[in-house]
Amino acid sequence: MERKKLAKPSEVFKDRLRSARENLRQMTQVDLARAIGLPPSSIAHFESGNRKPSFDNLHKIANALNVTTDYLVGRADDPNTTASADPIYRHVANLTDQNRRTAEDFLRFLAEQDRRQREGDHQ
């Protein structure tokens, strides 16, 4: 059986940073550096894998590129979705199929109740 080689976390970050900067936002390293208040050499170091950004700088980079930090570090494959986008998801993911259907029915009931309340407020 062939094993799939996983990329190192540092490789994921540097690759996704460059890809998001170039392909998603069409920015140069200088553009990104200016947007987050760092020297362009810092962006070059991040993309080469020689340095890792601080948490604050990771957050600034994600905001400037309009992607999530989860995407940049490899926890999510969609640049716009976090691994735990909704706190409810963490609970639903651990439910049995039957309880998941029950939860879905209940959420549908609540959504309908909210819709009716909004309609009543507008009359």
Image (cartoon, rainbow, N blue to C red):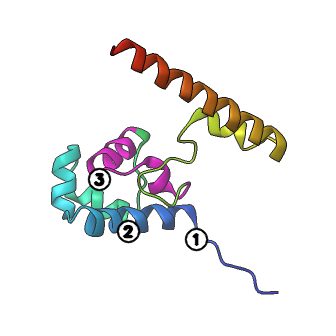
Q: Residue 7 — which label?
A: 1
Sequence-wise, the earlier of marks 3 and 2 is 2
3 vs 2, front mark:
3
CB atoms of marks 3 and 1 within 8 Å: no
Q: Name the kind of residue labelled 2 in the image.
A: Ser
Q: Name the kind of residue labelled 3 in the image.
A: Leu
- For disc 2, the marked residue is 48
Which secondary structure class fits the magenta region best? helix
SS for tag 1? loop
- The percent coordinates of residue 58 (x first, y second) are 39, 46
Q: Quadrant of the N terminus?
A: bottom right
Task: Decide if residue 9 is on the left or right side of residue 56.
Answer: right
Viewer can see residue 96: no
Task: Reply above or below: 52 against 50.
Answer: above
Q: Nearer the viewer, residue 42 or 83?
A: 83
Q: Nearer the viewer, residue 3 or 55?
A: 3
Q: Which residue is rendered at x = 48% and y = 21% of the image?
A: 116
Label 1: few (<14), some or many (≥20) within 10 Å?
A: few
Q: Quadrant of the C terminus?
A: top left
Inspect the magenta stretch and tell me whether residue 92 lies in it.
no
Label total for image? 3
- The percent coordinates of residue 89 (x first, y second) are 64, 40
Task: Decide if residue 109 is on the left or right side of residue 99.
Answer: left
- Separation of disc 1 and disc 2 at Cα? 15 Å
Task: Reply above or below: 60 against 118.
Answer: below
Q: Name the kind of residue labelled 1 in the image.
A: Ala
- The percent coordinates of residue 87 (x first, y second) are 60, 33
Q: Residue 65 — which label?
A: 3
Q: Nearer the viewer, residue 86 or 76?
A: 86
3 vs 1, front mark:
3
* Magenta extent: 56-75
Sequence-wise, the earlier of marks 1 and 2 is 1
